[in-house]
Image: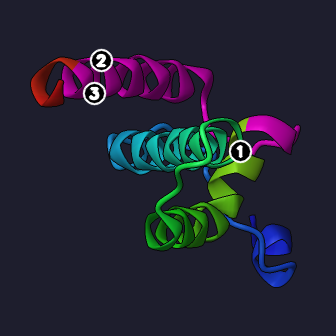
Amino acid sequence: QSKRYEQEIFDFGSSSSMFLPMTTVAIVNLVALVWGLYDLFVWREGLVLELMLASFAVVNCLPIYEAILLRKDDGKLPKNVCFLAGILTFVLIVSGYFVFK
């Protein structure tokens, strides 16, 4: 752990309830950016400021994406946190679709 600290790498190794909302927000931001880029390039209607805000959030969440997908050491996010965050993201997006439709 001290080696990762010296390399300035986050350590997400232990399972904690703190990681679930953080991971969920990171996935929601990524979905928002992908959806906004899809609207921009396919439908030619884009809200540029909202895309800038979503891209800023995605860039700030890069260590979380790295801990979800790329890391193979003990500092990665636990699988159950990633799975629960994915389910919670899906529930939030579907409920938001029905509420704001």
Rendered-image quadrant of the C terminus: top left
Q: Is residue 45 visible?
A: yes
Which residue does the numbered mark 3 point to in the structure image? Answer: 92
| Magenta stretch, residue numbers | 69-97
Picture residue at 57% right of the left edge, 41% below the top: 39
Sequence-earlier tag: 1 or 2: 1
Residue at mark 1: 41
Please, is residue 9 above or below residue 94 in the view? below
Q: Main secondary structure of the magenta part?
A: helix
Residue 37: x percent and y percent? 65, 47
Q: Are marks 3 and 1 in contact (CB under 8 Å)?
A: no
From the viewer's side, name the closer residue of 83 and 58. 58
**Mark 1: secondary structure:** helix
Scheme of image coloration: rainbow
Among numbered discs 3 and 1, the one appearing first in the sequence: 1
Dot 2 crowding, Cα within 10 Å, few <14, some 14–19, many 20+: few
Q: Which residue is mark 2?
A: 94
Closer to the camera in the image, 7 or 29? 29
Whether pointer 2 and pointer 3 mark residues with C-beta atoms closer than 8 Å, the reply is yes
> At 53% across and 69% down in the image, what residue appears?
48
Camera-side mark, 3 or 1: 1
Residue at 28% x, 27% y is 92
Q: In the image, what residue type sits under mark 2?
A: Val
Q: Position of residue 12 (x, y in %)?
A: 61, 51
Q: Is residue 74 magenta?
A: yes
Q: Quadrant of the N terminus?
A: bottom right
Residue 11 appears in the rendering: no
- Residue 98 part of the magenta segment: no
- The residue nearer to you, when weighing 60 against 34, is 34
Badge 3: residue crowd in 10 Å (few <14, some 14–19, many ≥20): few
Helix, strand, or loop for circle 3? helix
